[in-house]
Image: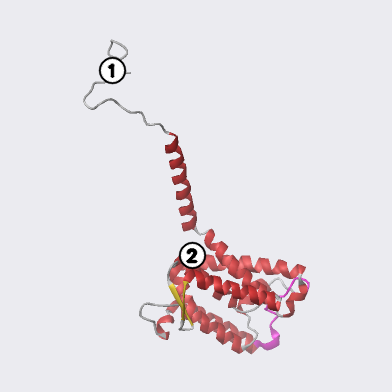
Amino acid sequence: MQYQQGPSFADLLTPRVVAVLGTLVALFLIQSVSGDRLPELSLFPLAAGFQPWQPFTYPFSQPSAVSAIVDWVVLIFLLEAGWAALGTRTFWLATASTWALATLGVVGLGYVWPESGRVPVSGTSWWFGAILVFWAMKHRGRSLRLMFAIELRAEVAVLAFGAIDLLRLLYYRDLGSAHLFLAFLASFSVLLFDEDNWRRWRLLRRRREIERQLSRLTVLEGGKSGERPRRNRTDDTVN
């Protein structure tokens, strides 16, 4: 993310980011120490090794230590920005909804396409694209600097990452790539159902209804100023 004064690495390690990373590191250490004594935590297709707990455990499973470290470093750079953009409650609701939609989609896809499960789904890579979407949609028009050199508008950067996920899916044709793209799409759909967007949509709809009603009204011209209204009757009844 591009910040006005450029934060240091320590600035990104806020207490809530440290809490999330500490949880992920602790779970990875438990898996490493346990070895093969733990059941399979990664997500497999329904017809090729699926277990009921896997949809809940695959985000905490890592294929290797290198993969885990890369995920943690990327989260350090993204997590606080996305968290601050939405607020704690909305951030976790959006994350949970993205996980649920993407997991449901990839489980269904794995049922009809079991051979795609050569590489099972694991890790938090799906969260990267979602957090980027959360941040970009709340900061439309802001600039995002990629790799310290390429500066793009937030919306353009998000679409570029989505295109990369789609190309990866078309090239590898595996369940892990499908999951990344599904999570990217799910994060957009989650923001569409955000309460602020719903409130804005209701206000715009109400505005259009009021404008439509006003357009049906006919304005009657009154008499000249100072002129008493004419009466068709001679009594005190005002017409």
In the rendered image, residue 218, in percent from the top left (x then y), is placed at 40, 31
| Three-letter amino acid code at the position of disc 2 | Thr
Q: Is residue 161 above or below residue 212?
A: below
Q: Residue furthest top?
A: 234
Residue 3 vs residue 90: left or right? left
For marks 1 and 2, give the one nearer the viewer: 1
Residue with the most extreme left position: 226
Residue for point 29% across, 15% down: 231
Tell which of 91 and 232 is nearer to you. 232
Q: Which segment is the magenta one?
A: 34-49
Q: CA distance from mark 1 to mark 2?
A: 63 Å
Q: Is residue 229 visible?
A: yes
Q: Earlier in the sequence, mark 1 or mark 2?
A: 2
Residue 199 placement (x, y as % from top left) = 46, 53
**What residue is disc 2 on?**
90
Query: Quick one: label 1, few (<14), some, or many (20+) residues within 10 Å?
Result: few
Q: Residues within 10 Å of mark 2 (few under 14, many from 20)?
A: some
Residue that carries the numbered disc 1 in the rendered image: 230
- The overriding secondary structure of the stretch rendered in magenta is loop
* Nearer to the camera, 61 or 212: 212
In this picture the colour scheme is secondary structure
Q: Is residue 131 visible to us here?
A: no
Q: Is residue 218 above or below residue 82?
A: above
